[in-house]
Image (cartoon, rainbow, N blue to C red):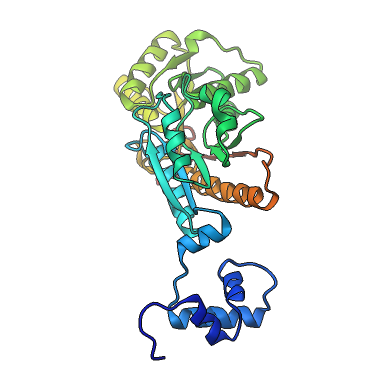
């Protein structure tokens, strides 16, 4: 076409025979543009290889098209998988990410991080660090200062904040009920660190399922680990000593469950005939344990993706209504995957 340099919105408008405002409405997917006009404009944008200015778009719509993401423990599979889901969906929806990682899971020096996010004019914040100890106390003092939507990916439900999370309680009840349905009556629990909200939810799910079945729960039936395989081995040995009649165990995560399988082998305990085992997380390796591990699968990539979608929806609602919107509460149900560690009738090949 004899053009040199980058195409401009005015060139697109001239080639399409429409106004610059019409091109802008097409670019920003606004209504009130005829379908044939929209197609013509999009074809010319493609032909001219026109790239809309991100700065101009953010100014015109009063958005930065950036989200703040606060996470912790990215060296672990759970947080890194959640971040992967966040990143993929943010990219798909046209949002950039500004990332901060806490120095530790329990860090509570939150004010500087919030100020940094807000100073960079993020449109919203995804709080993907787990709730541990007092690291949510800042909400009571600072929530009103945050003028953008914020979604928490792991926290105890409260009416004044938006939450998208895995339903740990439901998953734990499902795991325990599976063992009960197999005829197990003496079911122990290896908990994660109980300063974690997720670990407390999984403990409560086990307790409530047992009590609903008319079975008692005692202190000797629970041992606390710290999510690591090493802590799982210590915990199962303590549990077997204190609760020798145990015929089933719900383990708070798959990594600790791996140690249960090893300790049982070392003690000559047959799984699942003498001890049925269910883990929690659904890590890919769980299918290849020996025996393969029955587990509660939580899709954390999906969790991150859904959280981004919901945050975009909140941002759109705030911009449309120009006011604060009602918090959302979404709990994603995990899935029970039955394998040989609980059911001897499952084929040796896996699921």
Residue 147 visible within the image: yes
Residue beneath the point at 64% across and 17% down? 211
Q: How many marks?
A: 0
Give the image location of residue 110, x and y in percent: 44, 28
Give the image location of residue 113, x and y in percent: 42, 34
Horizontal arrangement in the rendering, residue 139 relative to residue 69 (left or right): right
Give the image location of residue 78, x and y in percent: 41, 38
Q: Front-most of 100 and 336?
A: 100
Residue 292 visible within the image: no
Residue beneath the point at 60% across and 49% down? 315
Corner quadrant of residue 223: top left
Residue beneath the point at 67% across and 20% down? 212
Q: Could you tell me which quadrant the N terminus lies in? A: bottom left
Corner quadrant of residue 175: top right
* Location of residue 115 with respect to 307 vertically, above or below: above
Give the image location of residue 292, x and y in percent: 40, 38
Q: Front-most of 254 and 84?
A: 84
Q: Front-most of 241 and 196?
A: 196
Horizontal arrangement in the rendering, residue 252 relative to residue 258 (left or right): right
- Residue that sits furthest to the bottom in the current view: 2
């Amino acid at each position: 076409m004899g053009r040199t340099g980058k195409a401009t919105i005015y060139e697109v408008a001239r080639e399409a025979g429409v106004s610059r405002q019409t091109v802008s409405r097409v670019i920003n997917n606004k209504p009130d543009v005829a379908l044939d006009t929209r197609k013509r404009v999009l074809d010319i944008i493609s032909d001219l290889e026109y790239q809309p200015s991100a700065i101009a778009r953010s100014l015109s719509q009063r958005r930065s098209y950036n989200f703040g993401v606060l996470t912790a423990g990215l060296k672990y599979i759970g947080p890194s998988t959640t971040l992967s889901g966040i990143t993929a969906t943010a990219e798909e929806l046209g949002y950039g990410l500004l990332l901060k990682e806490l120095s530790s899971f329990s860090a509570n020096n939150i004010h500087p991080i919030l100020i940094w996010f807000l100073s960079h004019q993020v449109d919203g914040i995804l709080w993907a660090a787990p709730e541990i100890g007092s690291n949510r106390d800042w909400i009571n003092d600072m929530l009103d200062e945050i003028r953008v939507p914020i979604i928490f990916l792991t926290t105890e439900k409260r009416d004044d904040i938006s939450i998208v999370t895995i339903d740990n309680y439901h998953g734990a009840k499902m795991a325990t009920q599976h063992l009960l349905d197999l005829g197990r009556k003496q079911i122990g629990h290896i908990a994660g660190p109980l300063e974690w909200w997720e670990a407390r939810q999984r403990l409560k799910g086990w307790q409530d399922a047992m009590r609903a079945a008319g079975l008692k729960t005692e202190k000797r039936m629970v041992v606390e680990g710290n999510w690591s395989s090493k802590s799982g081995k210590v915990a199962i040995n303590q549990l077997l000593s204190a609760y020798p009649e145990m015929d089933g165990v719900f383990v708070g995560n798959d990594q600790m469950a791996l140690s249960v399988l090893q300790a049982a082998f070392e003690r000559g305990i047959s799984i699942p005939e003498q001890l049925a085992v269910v883990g929690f997380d659904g890590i890919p390796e769980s299918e290849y344990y020996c025996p393969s591990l029955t587990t509660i699968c939580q899709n954390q990539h999906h969790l991150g993706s859904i959280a981004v979608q919901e945050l975009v929806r909140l941002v759109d609602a705030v911009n449309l209504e120009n006011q604060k919107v009602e918090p959302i509460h979404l709990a994603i149900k995990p899935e029970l995957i039955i394998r040989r560690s609980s059911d001897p009738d499952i084929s040796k090949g896996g699921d």
